[in-house]
Structures are given as C-alpha cells and as structure tokens.
Image (cartoon, grey):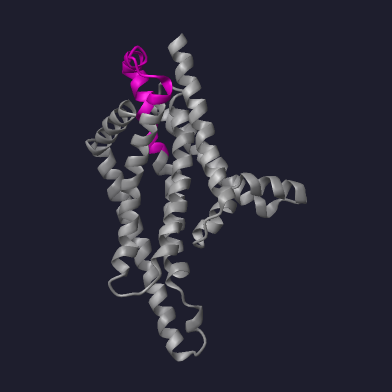
C-alpha cells in the first residue's frame, strides 16, 4: 500500500507543479463562475416572479434550479478535463523512456496502475473542490439541504472516476500524449452518446441494454439524492474493468 501511495503522491505533486494544470483550473473557474452567475440570476428572477404569482414559489428549488445545472456543466467539462489530467501518466513516461525503469523496479503492475489512478483522482478532487465552492458560497444567503447536494457531487465524482479509469487505459496504449488525449476524449464522448441514445431506442430490449450501460441512467438516482446499490455496483465494476485492462497492458510491456 505504501508503494501505491508513493506513486500517487508523486503524480499528484507532478500535477500541482505543472503550470498547465493551473491554466486549466483558471479556465474551469472562469467558465463555472460565468455560468453559475447566470443560473443564480435566473433563480432570483423566478423568486421575484413567485412573489407576485401565488403557487409558483412551491416550484422553486435551488437544488434543482441552480445546483444540478451547475453539476451538469461540470459533468460536460469532465469529458475534456479528465483526458487532460490522465494523458501524460503513461504516455509521457514512455516518451521519456522512464517507463522502462518503472517496469524494472520491484513494483507490481497493479501497484503502478493503482498509484497513477489515485494520483489522477487526487487531481480531480481539486477540480471538485473548486466546483463545490459555488454552492458553499451560496449557503451565505440561501438555505438548502446539504445531503442531496453532497450525494449529487459524489455521483458526478464517480463519473469522473470511471472516466479516469478509461482514460488512463488510453494513456497506456500510446507513447504520444496528443494521441492519448484524443483517444480518451473520443471514448468519453462515445460513452456520453450511449447515455443519450436511450431516448432514441426503438425496441424495448435495446432500450433495456442501453439503460444498463448508460451513465446517465445510473447517475439519475444519485443526482436526486438517492444512493442505489445497483448503480454503485455499475460504477465500481466499470472502474475495476478498465483498471484490470490497464494492468494487463502494463504487464505485457514488462514481459516484452
């Protein structure tokens, strides 16, 4: 376990020392700030209208009106943010020929994969900490339930975690950072399109299959503040599958 955490901490320090990471976080903050401000303005406008139209106030809920839109924007940005975080984890090591040194170390393949994966999750935690600051600041002048918000953030973090596992696998397949990013982004977009395809399925059996593998179907309960066991199994199974495939790629390089 200490070897895994050593690799994870090394990768995380590599992120926070990289100017590109700060540029990416600055752009994320700018986008979220602009869009969150727009959502809050719309919410206040609806609140003003509710004062003159009895019954409309019952429909106002800051969690659904503002916070879920905020998380949907974050979810969309993650399609491109996660590949930017994971693209260098294996590809750069191969390009610099330090990957061969890593393979000759006494570390096991799964320790290398888990260490790099945890390093990526730690970097993603910074992304979510920035996103969480907006609802946290809203608490200064609005009252809302924290439990559904935290569960919703946890659900989006699980999506980021499954993206990270898939994108880390893409990074292990190439020596080019650019190719790794493109492959990872395409894979994320493909998964997103599968989620959207549920609405367009003609037959019931196709709809059932698409729902079972759809991220949006499994995230819907978490977004609404409900934790479902089958959804957790889905996310952790997907993460485990891609980490296993990643470990097989690393082990195959070791045997070569």
Q: Is residue 84 above or below residue 226?
A: above
Q: Residue at x 48, y 20 (%)?
A: 249
Q: Is residue 180 above or below residue 235?
A: above
Q: Residue at x 40, y 24 (%)?
A: 176
The quarter of the picture where the N terminus appears is: top left
Q: Viewed as shown, does residue 200 lie left or right of 254?
A: right
Residue 64 falls inside the magenta stretch? no
x and y percent of residue 244 in the render? 51, 27
Number of dots carrying numbers? 0
x and y percent of residue 96 in the render? 31, 18
Residue at the top extreme, as displayed: 256
Residue at the front extreme, as displayed: 1
x and y percent of residue 196 in the render? 61, 51
Residue 100 falls inside the magenta stretch? yes
x and y percent of residue 243 in the render? 48, 30
Q: Residue at x 76, y 47 (%)?
A: 205
Q: Residue at x 50, y 59 (%)?
A: 223
The secondary structure that most of the magenta stretch takes on is: helix
Q: Is residue 124 above or below residue 67?
A: above
Q: Is residue 8 above or below residue 208?
A: above
Q: Which residues are magenta?
A: 83-112
Q: Quadrant of residue 23?
A: top left
């Amino acid at each position: 376990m200490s070897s895994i955490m050593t690799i994870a901490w090394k990768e995380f320090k590599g992120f926070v020392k990289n100017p590109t990471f700060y540029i990416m976080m600055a752009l994320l903050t700018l986008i979220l700030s602009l869009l969150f401000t727009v959502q809050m303005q719309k919410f206040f406008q609806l609140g003003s209208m509710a004062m003159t139209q009895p019954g409309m106030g019952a429909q106002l809920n800051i969690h659904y009106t503002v916070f879920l839109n905020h998380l949907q924007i974050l979810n969309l940005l993650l399609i491109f943010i996660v590949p930017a975080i994971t693209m260098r984890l294996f590809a750069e090591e191969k390009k610099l020929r330090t990957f061969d040194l890593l393979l000759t170390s006494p570390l096991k393949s799964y320790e290398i994969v888990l260490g790099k994966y945890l390093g990526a999750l730690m970097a993603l935690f910074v992304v979510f900490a920035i996103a969480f600051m907006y609802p946290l600041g809203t608490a200064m002048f609005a009252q809302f339930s924290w439990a559904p918000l935290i569960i919703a953030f946890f659900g989006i973090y699980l999506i980021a975690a499954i993206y990270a596992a898939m994108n880390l696998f893409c990074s292990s397949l190439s020596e080019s950072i650019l190719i790794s990013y493109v492959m990872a982004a395409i894979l994320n977009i493909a998964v997103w399109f599968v989620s959207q395809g549920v609405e367009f399925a003609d037959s019931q059996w196709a709809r059932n299959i698409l729902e079972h593998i759809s991220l949006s179907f499994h995230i819907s309960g978490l977004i609404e503040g409900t934790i479902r066991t089958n959804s957790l199994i889905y996310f952790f199974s997907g993460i485990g599958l891609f980490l296993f495939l990643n470990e097989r790629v690393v082990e195959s390089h070791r045997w070569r």
